[in-house]
Image (spheres, rainbow, N blue to C red):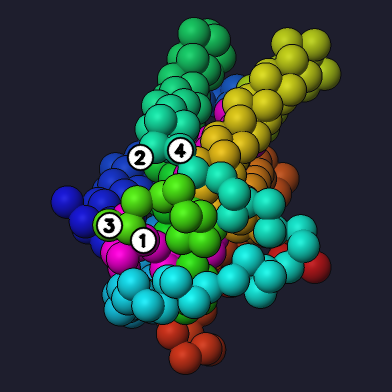
Amino acid sequence: MDRTRRIACLVLLAAVLAAVLAGRASGESPYRLGWSKDGRIAGASAVAGVGAALAGRTPEPLTVPEINELSRGSINPFDRSATWRYSDRIGEASDVLLGAVVAAPLALMLDARVREDWETCTLMYAETMALAVILPAFGKGTVDRIRPFVYNPDAPMDRKTTSDARKSFFSRHTSVAFASAVFVSTVYGDYHPGSAAGRCLWAGSILAAAAVGAMRYESGKHFPTDIVAGAAAGSAVGYIIPRIHRIGGERLSLRPDFRGSRPGLALELRI
């Protein structure tokens, strides 16, 4: 299944959950679902998915002569060190660690308060993951950035001459990892404000997400700026989705946006 279809499935999951679960929140939950807010999020996710699909052109692979002409000197000093990195083993390890980070919110079900409110948390996490996957697609579809390993003579040429080798910006692994880490920490903190365990959870989850980003760097798949952008996008999504649902946070909302050349989403703060 290609990435566009995976994105569509995630968006569909969020929309279906919104339709089934809206309004079903525990009386003691810090969150509240609603047709208005969750309908807007589902709509914004669907529109953003369409926009990402439209932006998701497949670039022509680099030719061997073009690759041989590439120079590390053309890379800014902050990112240049990534061009010396390449490791399939570390790249595969980043996939495994990402899977663990994405599954981490399941541990919230060990908490009695969260378990009683599982429908709300499931919906919020589906919305979070859908957006964390969709947002990097905009960058990959519109920014033609060659992955750092293409500059490394130790990397195999058959990897360098693929379309994916021109989709470095920005890191989807890091976006998803930070979205999950911030989400699980934010949600636990909302159920248990001021908890020492919550502070430990923040430290551990962010460290795990950062390790995913570090592995993407060491594997030669992404430049540091790709990773920073992914971390910023994922962190924003992981924080904003619970905040939109937080009781008393009704002024914040996500909605579809059609003002640009491609459909997207907009964060709206009502004062």
Using the image as rendered, state which of residue 156 and residue 102 is in the foreground: 156
Magenta-tinted stretch: 159-184
Q: Which amino acid does the dot numbered 4 rest on?
A: Ser
Query: Which element carries disc 2, helix, strand or loop?
Result: helix
C-alpha separation, residue under disc 1 versus residue under disc 4? 13 Å
Gap in angstroms between the C-alphas marked 1 and 2: 46 Å
Image quarter in which the C terminus is found: bottom right
Q: Nearer the viewer, residue 271 or 63?
A: 63
Residue 51's place in the image compared with 116, above or below, is: below
* Three-letter amino acid code at the position of disc 1: Lys
Q: Which mark is residue 158?
A: 3
Ranked by sequence position, the earlier of labels 2 and 4 is: 2
Label 4: state its secondary structure. Answer: loop
Q: Earlier in the sequence, mark 4 or mark 3?
A: 4
Q: Nearer the viewer, mark 2 or mark 4?
A: 4
27 is higher (above) or lower (below) than 66: above
Q: Nearer the viewer, mark 3 or mark 2?
A: 3
Q: Position of residue 198 (x, y in %)?
A: 73, 18
Location of mark 2 (residue) = 21
